[in-house]
C-alpha cells in the first residue's frame, strides 16, 4: 500500500487527513496488515486477497460482538470496504492499539501476563453461542452438541493427516486415544465464543500489560477448554498454572484431549503449507500426549 492508496482508504472517514507513512505490520500470514500514520492519528488497515475476502465480514462481526459484551482490549472497526476496486483489495480500517506483539517483546513477569490472558479468555467465554461450529457472521454448519462437533473435527483432521502423508501408526494411536476419551466432550453442554488462535503474536503488550487481542479469523463456537488448551499449547512458556489462575479454574481432563487436537491441526497446517521443518516436533508432541499416563 502506498501513500496515495492510504489516502483513499482514510478520506471517507476524515476528509482532510494527510497520511505521512504506511508501515507494514507483522502477523498477517494470510492478509497483509498496515499501520497508517497521520499527524494526529494512527490506524490499522487489514487488506484481503480475493481468496480470503469472505473473512472480512467475519472479523468485523466478531470484533463488534466482543465490543458489545465489553470485552477489551480489542480494535474498534471504523470502516469495512468489501469493494476491491478502491485499492485493489478489500480492506478494513480499525483503531490502533498500543503495544507490540508479546512474541517480540521481553516482559519481566510472563506469569502475570498469562494471568491477564486467563482473565481475558474468561471474559470472551461469557459470550454464548446458539450452536457448535465455525463462526462467520453466524455459526456455519451448526451442530447441537460438542460430542458431534469434536467428533467431526477430529475425523476431518485425521483424514487430512493421512492425505498429507502423516505416519499411519501415529494416526491410529491418535484415533484410538480420542475414541477412548470421547466421553469428555459431553462435559461441555453449551457453546461459547472461542477466539481459537491465542498465541503470543496475537497479543499486544506494553509495560507488562496486555493492550490488545487481535486476529479473530479462526473464531468458533465451542467448548471454552478448547480455547484454553490452544493458548497453553501455543505458548511454549510453561505458564499453564498462571493462565488457569487468571481464568479462575483448576486443570480439567479435557486439556490433554484438546491439546492433541491442536497438535494434529497444526501438523496438518504446516504440512499443507509446505513447512516440513516443524512436523517432527509436533508429531513427537502428539505421540507423547496419546502414549503417556
Image: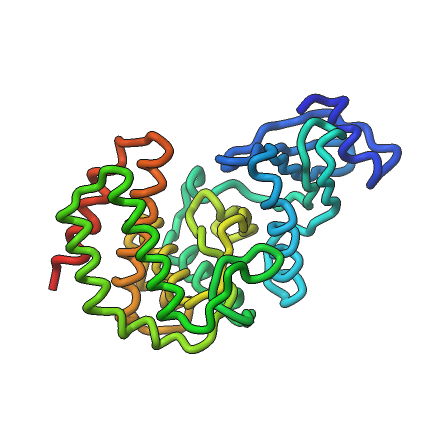
Residue 45 coordinates in the image, percent (x, y) = 66, 37
Q: Nearer the viewer, residue 193 or 271?
A: 271
Is 32 left, or right, of 243 in this rendering?
Answer: right
Is 76 left, or right, of 13 in this rendering?
Answer: left
Q: How many marks?
A: 0
Q: How is the rendered protein coloured?
A: rainbow
Residue 213 in sight in this render: yes
Quadrant containing the C terminus is bottom left
Q: Nearer the viewer, residue 290 or 73?
A: 290
Q: Nearer the viewer, residue 260 or 51?
A: 51
Residue 153 coordinates in the image, percent (x, y) = 36, 57
Task: Tell me what residue is drawn at x 49 percent, y 51 percent.
Answer: 218
Task: Tell me what residue is drawn at x 62 percent, y 57 percent.
Answer: 137
Task: Tell me what residue is drawn at x 37 percent, y 73 percent.
Answer: 249
Task: Tell me what residue is drawn at x 43 percent, y 46 percent.
Answer: 200
Q: Nearer the viewer, residue 225 or 161?
A: 161
Residue 271 coordinates in the image, percent (x, y) = 31, 36
Residue 120 in sight in this render: no
Quadrant containing the N terminus is top right
Residue 174 coordinates in the image, percent (x, y) = 20, 56
162 relative to 150, above or below = above
206 relative to 116, above or below = above
15 relative to 114, above or below = above
Is 50 left, or right, of 134 in this rendering?
Answer: right
Amino acid at each position: 500500500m502506498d501513500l496515495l492508496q492510504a489516502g483513499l482508504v482514510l478520506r471517507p472517514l476524515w476528509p482532510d487527513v494527510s497520511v505521512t507513512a504506511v508501515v507494514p505490520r507483522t502477523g498477517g500470514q494470510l492478509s497483509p496488515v498496515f499501520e497508517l500514520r497521520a499527524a494526529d492519528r494512527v490506524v490499522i488497515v487489514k487488506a484481503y486477497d480475493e481468496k480470503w475476502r469472505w473473512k472480512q465480514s467475519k472479523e468485523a462481526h466478531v470484533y463488534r460482538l466482543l465490543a458489545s459484551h465489553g470485552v477489551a482490549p480489542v480494535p474498534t472497526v471504523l470502516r469495512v470496504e468489501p469493494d476491491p476496486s478502491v485499492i485493489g483489495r478489500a480492506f478494513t480500517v480499525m483503531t490502533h492499539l498500543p503495544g507490540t506483539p508479546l512474541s517480540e517483546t521481553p516482559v519481566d513477569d510472563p506469569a502475570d501476563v498469562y494471568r491477564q490472558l486467563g482473565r481475558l479468555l474468561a471474559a470472551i467465554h461469557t459470550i454464548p453461542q446458539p450452536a457448535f461450529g465455525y463462526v462467520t457472521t453466524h455459526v456455519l454448519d451448526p451442530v447441537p452438541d460438542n460430542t458431534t462437533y469434536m467428533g467431526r473435527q477430529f475425523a476431518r483432521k485425521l483424514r487430512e493427516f493421512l492425505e498429507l502423508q502423516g505416519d499411519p501408526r501415529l494416526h491410529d494411536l491418535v484415533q484410538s486415544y480420542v475414541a477412548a476419551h470421547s466421553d469428555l466432550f459431553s462435559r461441555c453442554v453449551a457453546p461459547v465464543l472461542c477466539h481459537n488462535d491465542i498465541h503470543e503474536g496475537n497479543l499486544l503488550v506494553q509495560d507488562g500489560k496486555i493492550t490488545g487481542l487481535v486476529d479473530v479469523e479462526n473464531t468458533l463456537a465451542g467448548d471454552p477448554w478448547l480455547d484454553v488448551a490452544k493458548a497453553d499449547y501455543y505458548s511454549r512458556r510453561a505458564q499453564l498454572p498462571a493462565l488457569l489462575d487468571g481464568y479462575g479454574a483448576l486443570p480439567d481432563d479435557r486439556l490433554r484431549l484438546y491439546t492433541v487436537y491442536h497438535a494434529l491441526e497444526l501438523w496438518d497446517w504446516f504440512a499443507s503449507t509446505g513447512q516440513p521443518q516443524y512436523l517432527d516436533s509436533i508429531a513427537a508432541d502428539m505421540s507423547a500426549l496419546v502414549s503417556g499416563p
